[in-house]
Image (cartoon, rainbow, N blue to C red):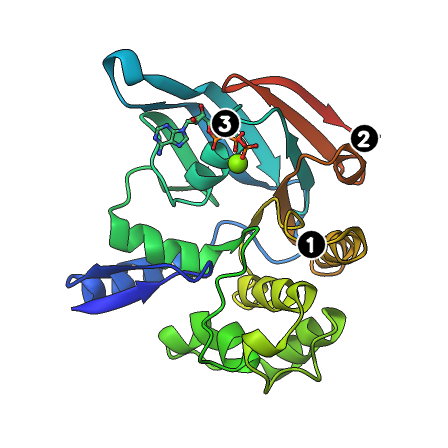
């Protein structure tokens, strides 16, 4: 039985791996969007709902959400605690499935994938960054960053690797173990890992929640840099209004519904 890692550092087991990888490779090698193209819809949610539990424990975490995001957008998702932000991000990243509705990433419906397909999809198409960094403590920073590629036996594009680690300011810490890095540096390594596959979507759930203000600001600047320089599409969940104001677009969620969706002119 093999273990299938995704870019957030989690994994699933499956024995139908080979077939699934082959099929997904075919799909992923023929993306709908061309690199650098803008005004292209990269993500579409149609009528998604997520209900947890039943009876007295029934919680409607997402309530009929429609959403479209274009390549290269930097979107902040804000809302009170419990409003459904993480649930939405997990569904967009194929970590979780909606109870109802469809999620299309680059035209591929991810809402019907089985767990193995979803893990492989995440590894290649979605960069996930959480409050906790999920680096593997026994591997060097370099290896942690390269894990998604190593698992697919893909060669690293050295120029791109150097560009990422340089812009994230961890170029001189690559041979260290994660435990020898500061929290901010560990989060930058986690971001490098999430970017190494040039994902269609970078999904970040409170990535600064565990950092002090200075390191938090640096992480947001780096996400913005990857958005501007690499045309990386970013969806960022944050509690911090100041951070949200730096985004091109701010989506507010309340009780599982989008109550406002504002683009900055
Ligand atoms: N696995 C689960 N089982 C049952 N209910 C859940 C589960 N995960 C989330 N919920 C419920 O779904 C709702 C939305 O949760 P979610 O984690 O998406 O909120 P959030 O906006 O990310 O909150 P926070 O800002 O505190 O992180 C909450 O009422 C929560 O209790
Ligand atoms: Mg949350």
Residue 261: percent from left, percent from top: 67, 22
Horizontal side of 186 relative to 222 (left or right) equals left
Task: For marks 3 and 1, give the one nearer the viewer.
Answer: 1
Answer with mark 3 or mark 2, whichever residue precedes in sequence. Answer: 3
The residue carrying mark 3 is: 84
Which residue lies most toward the bottom here?
175
**Please, what secondary structure does the residue beneath circle 2 have?**
loop
The residue carrying mark 2 is: 264
Query: Is the residue under label 1 in contact with that under label 3 (CB below 8 Å)?
Result: no
Horizontal side of 119 relative to 239 (left or right) equals left
Residue at x-position 69% and y-position 54%: 211
Q: CA distance from mark 1 to mark 2?
A: 27 Å
Residue 240: percent from left, percent from top: 73, 36
Q: Nearer the viewer, residue 140 or 157?
A: 140
Q: Nearer the viewer, residue 10 or 105?
A: 10
Task: For marks 3 and 2, give the one nearer the viewer.
Answer: 3
Q: Is mark 3 within 8 Å of ligand 1?
A: yes
Residue 11: percent from left, percent from top: 33, 60
Q: Is residue 30 visible?
A: no
Residue at x-position 52% and y-position 66%: 197
The residue carrying mark 1 is: 211
């Amino acid at each position: 039985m093999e273990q299938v890692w995704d870019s957030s550092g989690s994994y699933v087991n499956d024995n139908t791996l080979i077939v699934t990888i082959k099929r997904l490779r075919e799909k992923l090698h023929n993306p709908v969007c061309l690199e650098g193209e803008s005004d292209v819809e990269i993500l579409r949610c149609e009528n998604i709902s997520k209900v947890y539990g039943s009876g007295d424990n029934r919680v409607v975490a997402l309530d009929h959400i429609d959403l479209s995001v274009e390549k290269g957008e930097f979107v902040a998702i804000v809302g009170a605690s419990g409003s459904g932000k993480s649930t939405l991000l997990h569904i967009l990243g194929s970590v979780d499935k909606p109870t109802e509705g469809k999620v299309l990433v680059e035209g591929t419906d991810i809402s019907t994938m089985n767990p193995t397909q979803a893990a492989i999809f995440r590894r290649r198409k979605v960069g996930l960054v959480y409050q906790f960094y999920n680096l593997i403590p026994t591997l060097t920073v370099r290896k942690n960053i390269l894990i998604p590629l190593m698992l697919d036996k893909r060669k690293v594009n050295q120029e791109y690797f150097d560009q990422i680690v340089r812009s994230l300011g961890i170029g001189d810490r690559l041979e260290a173990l994660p435990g020898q890095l500061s929290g901010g540096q560990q989060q930058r390594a986690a971001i490098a890992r999430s970017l190494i596959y040039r994902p269609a979507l970078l999904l970040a759930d409170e990535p600064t929640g565990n950092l002090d203000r200075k390191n938090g600001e640096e992480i947001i600047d780096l996400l913005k840099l990857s958005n501007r320089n690499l045309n990386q599409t970013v969806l960022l969940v944050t509690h911090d209004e100041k951070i949200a104001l730096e985004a091109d677009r701010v989506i507010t969620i309340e009780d599982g519904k989008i109550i406002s969706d504002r683009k900055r002119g």
